[in-house]
Structure formats: C-alpha cells, structure tokens
Image (cartoon, helix red, strand yellow):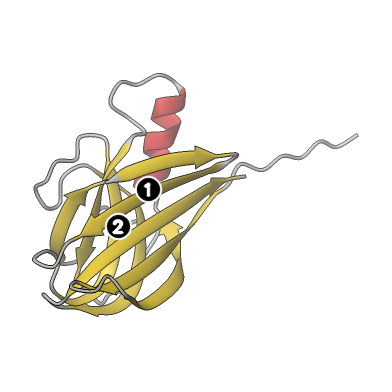
C-alpha cells in the first residue's frame, strides 16, 4: 500500500481600500501570494524548536514591479512596514491583518510581503515569508486593510 501525504502552505491576500472620512469601502481585491523559500525554511526551523523562528510579525508594501520569485528575501522597493494588527487561527488557516491609516503607505503600491523572525519596523529586516504583486493606489484620503490568509494543507 502506497501512502502519500502532502504538506503545503498557500496563501491569499485580501486588499481593501476605504475612504478615510466615511470609512466606506471603495474597493476589494483578492490575490494569491507566493510562499518563498526563506519562509519555508524558517517554518522548518520552528518545527525543530529553533528559537525566534516561524513567527510572522510585520506586513510591508512597496513600489517594486518585478514579479515575485521563490528565492526572494525582501521586497524590491519597500515603501512602508507595519506590525501585524491582529492574527487569528481557524482550523488550518491563520490570518494576519494589518491596517494602514491615511498618513501611511501612500503611493502606487505594486508589492506586499509578510515578514517575521527578527523583523523590526526597519525596512528589509527579518525573514520574508510571503510576497505578492498588487496594483493599488493609496492616498492620504484612504485607509488600507491587508488581510493575509495562509492555509496549511
């Protein structure tokens, strides 16, 4: 009898843009993301008990236009980084939510990523777990909510 099993990590990002004054939802888009090699390696380290590995703590957006690649270790051009606002777990899905207010992350956003391990508020720190291409213009009249859902299956 042949036994097969597969351990996969896949994710998607929900991008919601709101009017900063009325809080009215202006747009919603869901995009798939790429779980990069560095993120997978960190998860493997966490499984064997390595301290400070496997925890996602920051979300970042950038203006880089190069397509995500499995070997990426940072965003191409990071514009803004913020600590994850909330996280939750339901069954095999962990969700990370980050909220950018009207003064944060303004510009033409072309990429987003999740960071952890020794990540700080400083750009390009920590381990990149996920990266995705996006296409969203955010101004000071908008707020932005990013909700990453990572499914282990």
Is the residue marked by circle 2 packed among few (<14), some (14-19), or many (20+) residues within 10 Å?
many
Q: Is disc 1 in contact with disc 2, using a CB cutoff of under 8 Å?
A: no
Q: Residue at label 2? A: 113
The answer to whether residue 67 is seen in the rendering is no
Asked if residue 113 lies left or right of residue 76, the reply is: right
Residue farthest to the right, as pictured: 1
Q: Residue at label 1? A: 96
Residue 84: percent from left, percent from top: 27, 46
Residue 24: percent from left, percent from top: 31, 75
Asked if residue 46 lies left or right of residue 104, the reply is: right
Residue 140, by quadrant, is bottom left
Asked if residue 77 lies left or right of residue 43, the reply is: left
Q: Secondary structure at mark 1?
A: strand
Q: Nearer the viewer, residue 8 or 17?
A: 17
Residue visible at 62% across and 44% down?
Answer: 153
Look at the picture and state if 122 lies above or below 2. below
Residue visible at 81% across and 36% down?
Answer: 3
Residue 34, by quadrant, is bottom left
């Amino acid at each position: 009898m042949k036994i097969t099993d597969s351990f996969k990590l896949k994710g998607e990002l929900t991008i919601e843009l709101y009017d900063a004054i009325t809080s009215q939802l202006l747009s919603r888009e869901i995009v798939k993301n790429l779980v990069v090699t560095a993120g997978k390696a960190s998860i493997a380290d966490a499984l064997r008990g390595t301290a400070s590995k496997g925890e996602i703590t920051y979300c970042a957006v950038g203006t880089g236009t190069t397509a995500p690649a499995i070997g990426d270790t940072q965003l191409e051009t990071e514009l803004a980084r913020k600590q994850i606002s909330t996280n939750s777990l339901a069954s095999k899905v962990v969700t990370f939510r980050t909220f950018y207010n009207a003064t944060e992350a303004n510009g033409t956003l072309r990429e987003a990523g999740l960071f952890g391990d020794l990540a700080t508020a400083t750009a390009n720190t920590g381990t990149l777990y996920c990266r995705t291409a996006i296409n969203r213009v955010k101004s000071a009249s908008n707020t932005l909510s990013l909700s990453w859902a990572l499914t282990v299956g």
